Amino acid sequence: MKTLPATRQHARETTPRPYQTGILQRHPKNPIIAPGDMPVPCSSVFNCGATRFEDRVLLLLRVEDMARDNAFHVATSKDGVNFEIQPEPIDYPLRDTESRFLENRFDMRITQLEGHYYVTHASWLGGYGSCIGTALTKDFRSFEPVGELSVPSNRNAALFPEKIQGRYARLERPQNIDGGGRIWVSYSPDLLHWGQSRPVILPDTPWSRCKVGAGAIPIKTEQGWLCVYHATAKNCATENYYLGAMLLDLQQPDRVVAAPRQFILQPETPYECMGQVPNVVFTNGAVVMPDGTLNIYYGGADTRICLAQVSVDTLVEHCLTER
């Protein structure tokens, strides 16, 4: 029997289609760190803080064990893709409030500021809600608490990498009674006392109707503070997480310079759609590489760590031209 050639339609169906509906490019090695890659038994590894430390990319991995208790492990890499993971978790200090009520810490972000590395995180205090905590380190071996926790309920704290008009500043997400919330900017003279808070008013879009929170640490550019953030929206089955991008004014970061209505990443791949929390892409760490590439490290389905890339210039241009 003569074999007929494949039709063009058949060829389209059998040729693998790259996942690309946003401006970010997923790394072909995704997920770059999965539970099976860890040197300790765990159920998930995700939502890592990220920074440059010495000549390497450093991640603080959020690792959940089989009891779903969190620990944080340091991972380092020369190329930003292949990581060496320390088998021992960091020894992270407890505050007085945490020693009495802490149930879990999560989602650490790392800011290099004034010769130190500041780590911000959320602490879940059970019925008291979620609070922001801060510690500083120089070597990622010893950590020193900076002040006490914030009042609840607050999370997603991203500390700016320099003072703005003589004050420290951070993005944060106070939580509404329904569990939602939006991004705010707060200021401090000393990293201890925070106030003069202002909302960051972003476009109302169908993919950001439930929650809008800070993602990676803001990156200073000539056009403004470049921020990758997360937002969620419910559908008939789940509450999906997306990533967006915006530029904030360099001197008044509560003022939005540009914020496209389009998301830059949505859950599409199996490693983003299947896991302990389906349909999630969530970042709290990004690193500018020497060639200008922005490495965005994000959690896939709250189970594994993935990498998406774009040049800083391309993402800034996207913010300015896509309205």
Image: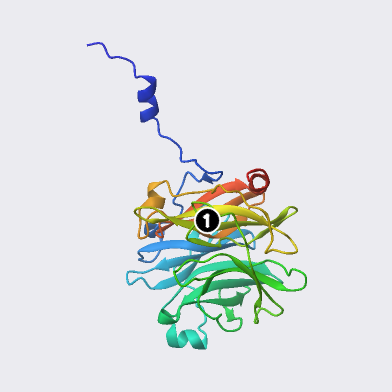
How many numbered badges does the structure rendering display?
1
Closer to us: 151 or 159: 151
From the viewer's perspective, is residue 115 above or below residue 231? below
- 234 lies left or right of 162: left
**What's the image's color scheme?**
rainbow
Q: Which residue is drawn at 49% across and 40% down?
A: 20
The residue located at (73%, 52%) in the rendering is 223
Quadrant of the rendered image containing residue 184: bottom right
Residue 126 at least partly seen: yes
Q: Is residue 84 left or right of residue 114?
A: left
| Quarter assignment of residue 318 | top right
Question: Mark 1 is on which residue type?
Answer: Tyr
Q: Nearer the viewer, residue 319 or 11?
A: 319
- Residue 148, how many percent across, how many down? 57, 84
Q: Position of residue 67 (x, y in %)?
A: 33, 72
Disc 1 marks which residue?
A: 297
Residue lying furthest top: 2
**Seen in the image, is 21 located left or right of residue 317?**
left
> Residue at position x 35%, y 24% from top?
10
**Image quadrant in which the N terminus is located:** top left
